[in-house]
Image (cartoon, rainbow, N blue to C red):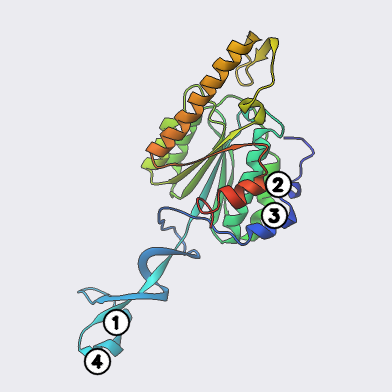
């Protein structure tokens, strides 16, 4: 990400106006420590009436409908829609491989996280950010309310890609230490030789609703390379001399296809929502079109 990037530059005013009309979607219901503004399918005792059920021993008499009792000589409780407190967990891969491309994958991830975070903040949900490298390296503490947007933008603008990747270990640690589950969005290129599967399964076991946004640069999807090359691994520093000819390109495309299919198949098999995107796709298009109805409403 360019050093001149400012928080205010991540999202345009026009985009923010469009984001204000959206809300987060979750496939699971979560009960937090405070009441939120999201209507839950559970029946609770908020102010919005939902239904009746027969009175049972030990039920609170304050919720008996005495008008029905007067007509039917039977006790019925009034039920109300419970309000749930959703927490959005934004998990960003900040390893060195995320610097690749133009724009860099981490810059794209920061803009996407800021957009999703604003949707949550504007809806009075709690939003937190964690940055993953070989471990959970840093974070933006969970906050609520649109007044926190500038702080979120400034945090996202300061992110730098560096160091090795340890997706599974970091995600397992995050899942275990999180006091509350919620909507977890992993934004990553998934380029970890040790894999990511164990970490995603740890989030599922802790009852997170998990989404993966798989970022790839156009240069990774369609490399323009030829001849004798010296390649340096961005995370390990390992150097390898390489000749890119027709056979090598075919092998690359085959392995890339296997990698992408493996990621999508794993997510599908484990009921994880999977979204693959190239970083030349405008963030606005990704959020307002591709994620609409899947992650956003």
Instruction: Give the secondary structure at mark 1.
Output: loop
The relative height of residue 166 versus residue 213 in the rendered view (above or below) is: above
Q: Do the numbered discs 4 and 3 sit on residues whose CB atoms are within 8 Å? A: no
Label tally: 4
Q: Which callout, 3 or 1, points to the residue nearer the camera?
A: 3
Label 1 – label 2 distance at C-alpha: 51 Å
Q: Quadrant of the N terminus?
A: top right
The relative height of residue 229 versus residue 51 in the rendered view (above or below) is: above
Q: Residues within 10 Å of mark 3 (few under 14, many from 20)?
A: some
The relative height of residue 59 versus residue 191 in the rendered view (above or below) is: below
Label 4 – label 2 distance at C-alpha: 61 Å
Looking at the picture, how far across and down is residue 225, in whole percent? Answer: 69, 17
Q: Which residue is mark 1?
A: 64
Instruction: Specify whether 293 is left or right of 203.
Output: right
Quarter assignment of residue 2: top right
Q: Which mark is residue 15?
A: 3
Looking at the picture, how far across and down is residue 56, in whole percent? Answer: 21, 74
Instruction: Give the secondary structure at mark 4.
Output: helix
Q: Which mark is residue 43?
A: none
The relative height of residue 180 versus residue 23 in the rendered view (above or below) is: above
Instruction: Give the secondary structure at mark 3.
Output: helix
The first of marks 1 and 2 along the sequence is 1
Q: Residues within 10 Å of mark 1 (few under 14, many from 20)?
A: many
Instruction: Give the secondary structure at mark 2.
Output: helix
Q: Which mark is residue 71?
A: 4
Quarter assignment of residue 163: top right
Q: Which residue is mark 2?
A: 154
């Amino acid at each position: 990400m360019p050093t001149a990037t400012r928080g205010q530059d991540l999202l345009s005013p026009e985009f923010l106006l469009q984001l204000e009309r959206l809300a987060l979607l979750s496939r699971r219901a979560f009960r937090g420590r405070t009441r939120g503004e999201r209507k839950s399918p559970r029946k609770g005792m908020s102010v919005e009436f939902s239904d009746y059920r027969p009175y049972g021993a030990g039920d609170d008499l304050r919720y008996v409908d005495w008008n029905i009792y007067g007509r039917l000589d039977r006790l019925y409780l009034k039920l109300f829609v419970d309000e749930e407190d959703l927490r959005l967990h934004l998990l960003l891969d900040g390893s060195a491989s995320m610097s690749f491309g133009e724009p860099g994958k981490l810059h794209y991830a920061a803009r996407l996280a800021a957009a999703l975070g604003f949707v949550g903040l504007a809806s009075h949900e709690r939003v937190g950010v964690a940055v993953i490298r070989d471990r959970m390296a840093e974070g933006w503490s969970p906050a609520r309310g649109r007044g926190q947007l500038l702080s979120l933008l400034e945090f996202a603008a300061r992110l730098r890609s560096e160091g090795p990747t340890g997706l599974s270990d970091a995600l397992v640690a995050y899942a275990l230490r999180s006091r509350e589950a919620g909507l977890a969005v992993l934004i990553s290129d998934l380029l970890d030789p040790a894999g990511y599967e164990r970490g995603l399964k740890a989030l599922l076991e802790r009852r997170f609703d998990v989404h993966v946004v798989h970022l790839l640069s156009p240069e990774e999807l369609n490399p323009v390379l030829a001849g004798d090359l010296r390649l340096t691994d961005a995370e390990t520093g390992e150097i390898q001399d390489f000749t890119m000819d027709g056979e090598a390109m075919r092998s690359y495309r085959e392995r890339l296809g296997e990698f992408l299919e493996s990621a999508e198949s794993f997510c599908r098999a484990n009921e994880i929502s999977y979204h693959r995107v190239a970083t030349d796709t405008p963030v606005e298009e990704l959020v307002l079109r591709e994620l609409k109805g899947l992650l956003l409403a």
